[in-house]
Image: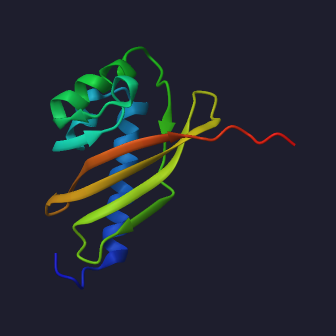
Amino acid sequence: MKPDADLVAVRAQVFAAERAFARSMAERRLEDFARFVSDEAIFFSGPNGQPLRGKAQVTGGWAKFFEGPAAPFSWEPDEVEPLPSGTLAHSSGPVRDPSGKIVARFNSVWRLEAPGVWRVIFDKGSPLPPPRAP
C-alpha cells in the first residue's frame, strides 16, 4: 500500500482477521488457524519459550491446543496499530482461561501478504504479573 493507506480500513481488516483467528481456536479448527499463519511466522510458544519457526512448526506446536472439545484458552484483540504504509500491524489483547479469567496478554504482528490477506508473522504471549502484596 502507499503511505497514505486508509488506516481506519486497515485497522478494521486486522481486527477482523484477529477475531477470525481466535474463532478458529474456539471452533476447534486447526486448519483454519493455519490459514492465518505466515509461512515465515515465528511464534514464541515452543517448549521452554523456544520459538516455533514457520507455518508447519507453528501449526504442529499448536495442534495440542486443538485437542479435546473445549478450547484451553481464548483471546480477543483490544488494540490494533498499523504502520502508515498499511502493510504491517501490531495487535494485542487479553488471553482468558476457560472460566473467562484474564491470564495473559498476546502480542502479534500481522503482515499484508496479498490484497485483503493478513497473516501473523510474530506472536508472543506474556503472563500477567502476580498481584502485589498490600
Q: Quadrant of residue 3?
A: bottom left
Q: Residue at x 39, y 43 (%)?
A: 124
Q: Nearer the viewer, residue 40 or 7?
A: 40
- Up/down of 111 relative to 68, above or below: below
Q: Position of residue 100 (x, y in %)?
A: 62, 34
At x 30%, y 38%, the residue is: 43
| Residue 5 x, y percent position in the rendering | 25, 80
Q: Residue furthest bottom?
A: 4
Q: Quadrant of the N terminus?
A: bottom left
Colour scheme of this structure image?
A: rainbow
Would residue 8 appear left or right of 41 to someone viewing this image?
right
**Residue 83, percent from left and from top:** 30, 72
Q: Quadrant of the C terminus?
A: top right
Question: Residue 64 in the image: x percent, y percent?
Answer: 35, 18
Is residue 38 at least partly visible in the picture? Answer: no
The residue that appears at 36% across and 56% down in the rendered structure is 16
Circle count: 0
From what the image shows, is residue 9 above or below residue 110?
A: below
Q: Is residue 28 visible?
A: yes
